[in-house]
Image: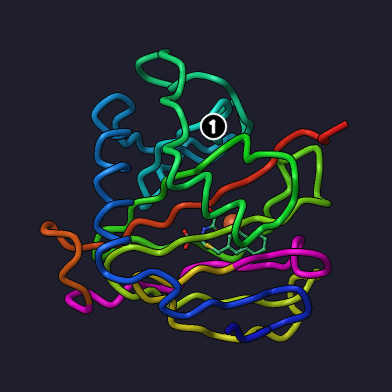
């Protein structure tokens, strides 16, 4: 069962039970041992993001003074990104239902004061594939609008275990995280929130 919050934007509330969330969290912790969270910076200004990031899968999204891009290695360690955990790839098969596998899983970590301003995801060469988002930990106030900045927006509380699928017309919707609600989940011992986004970057040919 899901709610369609905008055309092509499907919200699967409580898609994962606590045990499945804990298992995916353990997979993410193992990824972060190999590929620690880094602090991205804004292009040109170099202003640091409040969200920390890492990736798994063949490609990872990074941002620094040189710009936004996908690359096959960690910006600090220069090591290839860890493999995509099979349980994450399985979510893609179930929910995204496209034959080509995900090429990148961006891992965002939000502490109590982190936010992500309204933006579009357009660094991928292929916008036809969906983006799948999984939230783990504290609830986030997520905002989604239309394809033009200034279009009306809608606010949604993304809770631990929720899956959000962006496809079709919503793939280029403006969206962001206004804030997280500290203390709303006990999944992460340290508090805060992980968001995982599975993406295709290149056309499947
Ligand atoms: C709508 N992440 O990593 S996930 C991002 O909670 C990002 O960390 C947020 O925006 C987070 O780029 C939101 C939901 C989401 C992800 C990708 C989208 C919504 C989207 C792509 C297109 C439209
Ligand atoms: Fe985004």
Q: Which residue is farthest left?
A: 189
Q: Is residue 28 found left or right of 58 in the rendered image?
A: left
Tell me which segment is drawn in magenta: 165-184
Residue drawn 71% across and 37% down? 201
Quadrant including the N terminus: bottom right
Q: Is residue 189 above or below residue 101?
A: below
Is 141 positioned to the left or the right of 72 in the image? left
Q: Position of residue 126 (x, y in %)?
A: 81, 42
Q: Position of residue 55 (x, y in %)?
A: 45, 35
Using the image, determine if residue 17 lies above or below residue 85: below
Q: Quadrant of residue 141?
A: bottom left
Q: Is residue 68 above or below residue 143?
A: above
Instruction: Name the element at disc 1.
Output: strand
**Camera-nearest residue between 11 and 173:** 11
x then y, percent, for residue 125 = 80, 37
Does 15 lie within the magenta span? no
Q: Which residue is mark 1?
A: 60
Image quadrant holding the C terminus, namely top right
Ligand number 1: quarter of image: bottom right
Q: Residue at x 36, y 52 (%)?
A: 50
Spot occupied by residue 191 in the image (x, y as percentages of width and height): 17, 63
The foreground one among 100 and 150 is 100
């Amino acid at each position: 069962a899901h709610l369609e919050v905008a055309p092509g934007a499907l919200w699967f509330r409580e898609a994962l039970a606590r045990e499945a969330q804990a298992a995916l969290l353990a997979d993410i912790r193992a990824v972060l041992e190999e590929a620690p969270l880094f602090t991205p910076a804004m292009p040109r200004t170099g202003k640091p993001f409040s969200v920390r990031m890492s990736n798994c899968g063949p490609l990872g999204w990074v941002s620094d003074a040189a710009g936004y891009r996908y690359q096959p290695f960690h910006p600090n360690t220069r090591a290839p990104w860890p493999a995509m955990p099979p349980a994450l790839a399985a979510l893609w098969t179930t929910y995204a239902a496209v034959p080509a596998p995900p090429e990148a899983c961006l891992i965002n970590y939000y502490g109590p004061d982190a936010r992500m301003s309204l933006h579009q995801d357009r660094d991928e060469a292929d916008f036809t594939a969906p983006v799948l988002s999984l939230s783990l930990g504290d609830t986030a106030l997520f905002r989604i609008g239309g394809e033009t900045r200034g279009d009306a927006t809608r606010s949604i509380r993304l809770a631990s275990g929720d899956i959000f699928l962006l496809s079709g017309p919503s793939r280029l919707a403006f969206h962001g995280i206004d804030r997280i609600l500290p203390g709303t989940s006990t999944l992460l011992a340290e508090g805060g929130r992980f968001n995982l986004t599975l993406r295709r970057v290149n056309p499947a040919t």
